[in-house]
Image: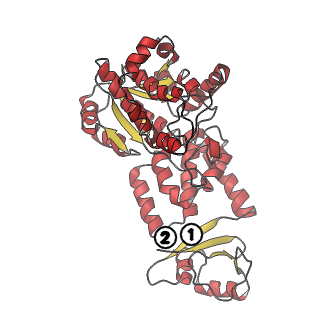
Amino acid sequence: MMNVSTDAQKIEALLSRGVVEIIHEESLRKKLQSGTQLRIKLGIDPTSPNLHIGRAIPLLKLRDFQELGHQIVLIVGDFTAVIGDTSDKDSERPMLARDVIEENKKAYLDQAGKLLDLDKIEFRYNSEWLGPLDYNQIGEHADQFSVADFIARDNIKRRLDAGKRVSLREVLYPLMQGYDSVAIKADVELGGTDQRFNLLAGRVLQEHFGQEAQNIIIGPLINGLDGRKMSSSWGNTINLTAEPADMYGKVMSMQDGEILTYFELCTRVPMSRIDDMRDLLNGAEISPRDAKMELAKEIVTLYHGADAAGKAEEAFVETFQKRNPFLVEEVVRREGETYADALVRTEIVSSKSELSRLLDAGAVSDTSTGEKYDTLPDTPGATLKIGKRRFVRFGDS
């Protein structure tokens, strides 16, 4: 058994970083402070060969638990993958063939190993206990829930209201995920906001079978590169299997408004640094581009190592900033400033005299229309090319 750390700062970070809800927080806090080794459960259905950084958020939380000395139990849902969880879907999932599940399962474990010490993890396959269940046992489990509970879920209600089909096999999924917690005697289960009903099902069934109900840590879902929820179906993901340069470039293409969220959820950069970054961005003392470069390097380092991250950064700068410099920097003017003042402060230009020379030379233009400016526009939202290599978008604080 590993030694369990009760370090107060680490416990606080564990319970606060990237957490939407804890059921029940004080109970879990006392268990963590007691030094008792807890069994931390995460279930992953191998429905795709690729994990993306959104799906890796709970893996990072597992790593936090692992570093404190707790026992990680990773459940590969080889049985539940056949059913398919529709908690985050507005339609049925197709049933998967067993050979596809087996291939995906191996790929999942290879990718999980980028974040977790696999040698210290207890791996279980839920076909071990779900496969042998008979109708009497399934009926006993189902009796703990009502149809009203199931159809009250937002995504199910939307589908029913829209006249879309909801199959009875979907009703079984929460029972199966819940029984997983009984089978492995989970103390804590991790999951996303879309899985709240399934996570609570574990507590219900554990109490039914005379076990102490697990605590639950619910984490957020992140948006993908296009601003919609990150999903392989929409092609807006950053996959863990991506090559370093590709991973770096995709982070750079994300929307500026997601920078701080990605720092908190997808890295383990200290929260103090993220708070500093928030202040710098809000004060326009760092450009979103530079913040994203720091973020991209952190994410690539996490999955590929520091050397690969350094090379990916060099490749990005060479390819996009020198050859194809279409990187737009947000320039926000402070109260009492003109945009000319803001351009000098952010070092887009060295001085107002340089800006005047660029305007006189026709080197300041609108990126959409190509119109050349002889005076600087005073228009929030304007996107300009300044000189040969700088692209800026004007904003207001």
Q: Name the quadrant containing residue 1.
A: top left
Which residue corresponds to the image point at 63% horizontal and 26% vertical from the top-left?
96
Of the pair 280 and 229, the residue shown nearer to us? 229
Q: Nearer the viewer, residue 38 or 49?
A: 49
| Dots 2, 1 in contact, CB < 8 A | yes
Nearest the viewer among 135 and 29 is: 135
Above-or-below relation of 188 to 284: above
Q: Badge 2: how crowded within 10 Å, few (<14), some, or many (20+)?
A: many
| Residue that mark 2 sits on | 284
Tag shown at residue 330: 1
**Above-or-below relation of 305 to 363:** above
* Residue 48 at least partly seen: yes
Q: Position of residue 238 (x, y in %)?
A: 61, 45
Inspect this view and state whether residue 38 appears: no
Q: CA distance from mark 2 to mark 1?
A: 8 Å
The structure's colour scheme is secondary structure
